[in-house]
Image (cartoon, coloured by chain):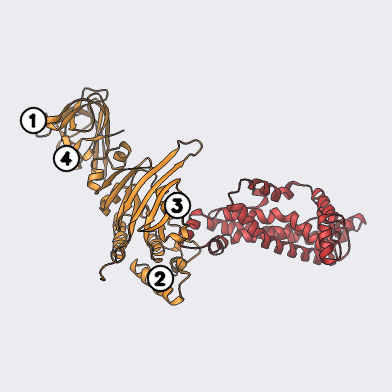
Chain colours: A red, B orange
């Protein structure tokens, strides 16, 4: 159960951070006219195609005692980042970034531009337009972003293994736990955990699709899911 | 001194060049002065009307020019002034209305009044909802009210901020004419007390006739006519404008000769021996021109008419008769094809039928000379 609680705690932290950081990032990506925007778009989408081991490897190197992140962390907190819960959160945030940012971009972009023009000519600042018009009309996108980053973090394996190792109560998440059980031929225990994860994932995805259908039909459009991207 | 406060005039000189890949570059080059009251901006779609409004509202930046309300400069390319839309106090009702779908009518109207104390806000919202007769719908969302009601809410939302100029981009399309004129009446009543310049964009001839105000006609990014609807639209100077103004017959031809003492010139219609007399225009013999004639201005006779003041009598044959409601549309082949509008009664009493020989009678002054 330790592993499950740890996974839940990790997923909650990661989706909260991603929502807070993803909203300004997605706003910028949706509305900026900067020419080099595509570079940042590519970077945000990288975790979708990169093997988790590659991402995990570089994050591990950066977080190591000689790496820039590890050094920085050490000067502030007096200990390293690798193989800690904080390190795991950081790596997971990077890994789940596209799952939060893409649905946000998609829902910000689908807000009718004329509504934004109307808001401007009525005297509203950019912030007011964002908080009173764009955000309320993007609630389905926010839900999708939250749910997908939660689910994706719950199920991640490769990055956790690379960055977190396998420390009980600190970095041993459900997926690592299942792997451990299988390695030691404890199939019954592995099956219990696997079922829990399966149930969670299924529930979460049903939720996403239900919200999508309900709200999508109201707004007359479909929301972003990784399977319908681009 | 006291007396009536006269709202300042809107002056706009706008130059803008846009090149879209795959399309011909579009140039907007206009200069306008809009006095308080309703001015109609008329022209076919693609004439640049909406782009001009976007420039005045500050949503699109012109390449050059100057836009001002009275002495207050909103945009000036020389002194590099370009005020943000938020600071212009120019209200704008879009064709799609752009009401906020997640807010009630009341919340939509109150949206632009954030800086005001609660009490004044409520008072102003109440007043304008009543003036536009939508105070009973205040709690409803845009999706829960009719098209006409949405248009009223959109007008109320933009006028409640007490703008100095109102821009209307075909705000009443899709409404029947009765509903349209009821809304326009309320808008007029509201503006009688304020007298701000209102620029009303439309491409519908019917709306121009209903509003009956000063018209500025635009085409291809330029002003092509200005004045009363009669003067601007009854004798259009450009082909596309003639089409938009409802001239069913646009016939190309060549000027044969000018008869200046009679005030007419003769034009031979393309690929036929038909010659008609039209009022003198700026043309010389041999020029290629277009003649615009309304289908309703053509008389039709079943025997050769004589003793007429009308100078143009052309013989032809009916090739098709189509009934459209209370109107019969006849296609007549006279070497070139004419469209003639008749009443069903006249069609019956003249026993018109396809193949029948007829004579068309055109008054010289119903034939308008149009530039390509």
Q: Chain of mark 1?
A: B
Near mark 4 (Cα within 10 A), the count class, few <14, some 14-19 or many ≥20, is few
Neighbourhood count class around disc 3 (C-alpha, 10 Å): few under 14, some 14–19, many 20 upward: few
Tell me if I can see residue B358 in this picture.
no
Q: Which of the two discs, 4 and 3, sits closer to the camera? A: 3
Choose the circle earlier in sequence order: 4 or 3: 3
Q: Are marks 4 and 1 on the same chain?
A: yes
Q: Nearer the viewer, mark 1 or mark 3?
A: 3
Q: CA distance from mark 4 to mark 3?
A: 65 Å
Pinpoint residue A218: horizontal percent, then vertical percent.
53, 58
Q: Residues within 10 Å of mark 1 (few under 14, many from 20)?
A: few
What secondary structure is marked by label 1? Answer: loop
Q: CA distance from mark 4 to mark 1?
A: 20 Å
Q: Chain of mark 4?
A: B
Asked if A67 appears above or below B259 in the picture, the reply is: below
Q: Earlier in the sequence, mark 2 or mark 4?
A: 2
Residues at marks 2 and 4 on the same chain? yes
Check disc 4 and report the residue beneath it: B346
Question: Which corner quadrant holds the C terminus of chain B?
Answer: top left
Residue B231: give x, y in percent of width and height: 23, 45
Question: Which picture quadrant has residue B305?
Answer: top left
Q: Are labels 4 and 3 assigned to the same chain?
A: yes
Examine the rendered structure and indicate whether residue A160 appears above or below residue B342: below
* Residues under numbered marks 1 and 3 in contact, where contact means CB atoms less than 8 Å apart: no
- A11 sits to left or right of B101: right
Secondary structure of residue under mark 2: helix
Look at the image and tell me whether residue A83 can be seen: yes
Q: Which residue is mark 1?
A: B306
Label 4, secondary structure: give it.
helix
**Between A226 and A201, which is closer to the camera in this rendering?**
A226
Mark toward the start of the polypeptide (4 vs 1)? 1
């Amino acid at each position: 159960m330790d592993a499950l609680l740890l996974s839940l705690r990790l997923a909650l932290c990661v989706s909260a951070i991603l929502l807070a950081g993803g909203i300004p990032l997605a706003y910028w990506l949706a509305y900026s006219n900067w020419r080099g925007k595509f570079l940042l778009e590519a970077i945000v989408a990288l975790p979708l195609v990169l093997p988790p081991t590659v991402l995990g490897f570089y994050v591990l190197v950066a977080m190591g005692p000689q790496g820039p992140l590890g050094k920085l962390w050490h000067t502030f907190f007096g200990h390293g980042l690798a193989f800690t819960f904080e390190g795991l959160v950081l790596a997971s945030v990077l890994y789940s970034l596209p799952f939060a940012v893409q649905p946000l971009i998609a829902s910000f972009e689908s807000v009718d531009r004329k509504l934004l023009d109307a808001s401007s000519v009525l005297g509203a600042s950019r912030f007011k337009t964002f908080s009173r018009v764009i955000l309320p009309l993007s609630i389905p996108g926010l839900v999708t972003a939250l749910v997908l980053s939660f689910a994706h973090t719950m199920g991640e394996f490769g990055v956790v293994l690379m960055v977190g190792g396998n420390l009980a109560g600190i970095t041993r998440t459900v997926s690592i736990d299942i792997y451990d059980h299988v390695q030691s031929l404890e199939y019954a225990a592995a099956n219990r955990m696997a079922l829990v994860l399966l149930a969670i994932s299924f529930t979460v995805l049903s939720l996403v699709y239900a919200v999508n259908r309900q709200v999508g039909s109201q707004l007359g459009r479909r929301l972003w899911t990784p399977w319908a991207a681009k | 001194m006291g007396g009536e406060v006269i709202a300042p005039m809107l002056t706009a000189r706008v130059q803008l060049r846009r090149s879209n890949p795959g399309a011909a570059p579009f140039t907007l080059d206009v200069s306008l002065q809009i006095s308080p009251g309703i001015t109609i901006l008329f022209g076919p779609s693609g004439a640049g009307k909406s782009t001009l409004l976007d420039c005045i509202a500050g949503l699109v930046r012109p390449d050059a020019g100057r836009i001002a309300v009275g002495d207050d400069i909103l945009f000036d390319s020389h002194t590099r002034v370009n005020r943000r839309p938020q600071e212009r106090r120019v209200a704008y009702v879009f064709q799609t209305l752009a009401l906020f779908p997640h807010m009630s009518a009341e919340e939509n109207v109150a949206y632009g009044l954030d800086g005001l104390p609660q009490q004044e806000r409520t008072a102003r919202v109440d007043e304008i909802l009543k003036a536009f007769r939508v105070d009973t719908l205040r709690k409803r969302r845009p999706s829960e009210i009719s098209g006409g009601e949405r248009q009223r809410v959109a007008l109320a939302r933009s006028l409640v901020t007490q703008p100095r100029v109102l821009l209307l981009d075909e705000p009443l399309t899709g409404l029947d004419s009765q509903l349209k004129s009821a809304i326009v009446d309320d808008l007029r009543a509201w503006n009688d007390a304020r007298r701000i310049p209102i620029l009303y964009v439309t491409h519908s001839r019917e709306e121009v006739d209903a509003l009956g105000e000063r018209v500025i006609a635009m085409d291809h990014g330029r002003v092509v006519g200005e004045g009363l609807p009669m003067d601007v639209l009854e004798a259009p100077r450009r082909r596309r404008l003639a089409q938009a103004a409802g001239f069913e017959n646009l016939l190309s031809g060549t000027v044969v000769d000018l008869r200046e003492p009679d005030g007419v010139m003769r034009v031979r219609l393309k690929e036929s021996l038909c010659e008609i007399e039209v009022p003198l225009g700026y043309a010389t013999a041999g020029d290629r021109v277009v003649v615009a004639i309304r289908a309703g201005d053509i008389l039709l006779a079943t025997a050769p008419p004589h003793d007429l003041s009308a100078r143009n009598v052309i013989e032809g044959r009916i090739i098709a008769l189509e009934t459209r409601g209370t109107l019969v549309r006849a296609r007549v082949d006279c070497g070139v094809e004419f469209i003639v509008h008749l009443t069903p009664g006249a069609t019956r009493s003249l026993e018109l039928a396809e193949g029948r020989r007829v004579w068309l009678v055109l008054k010289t002054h119903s034939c308008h000379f149009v530039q390509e």
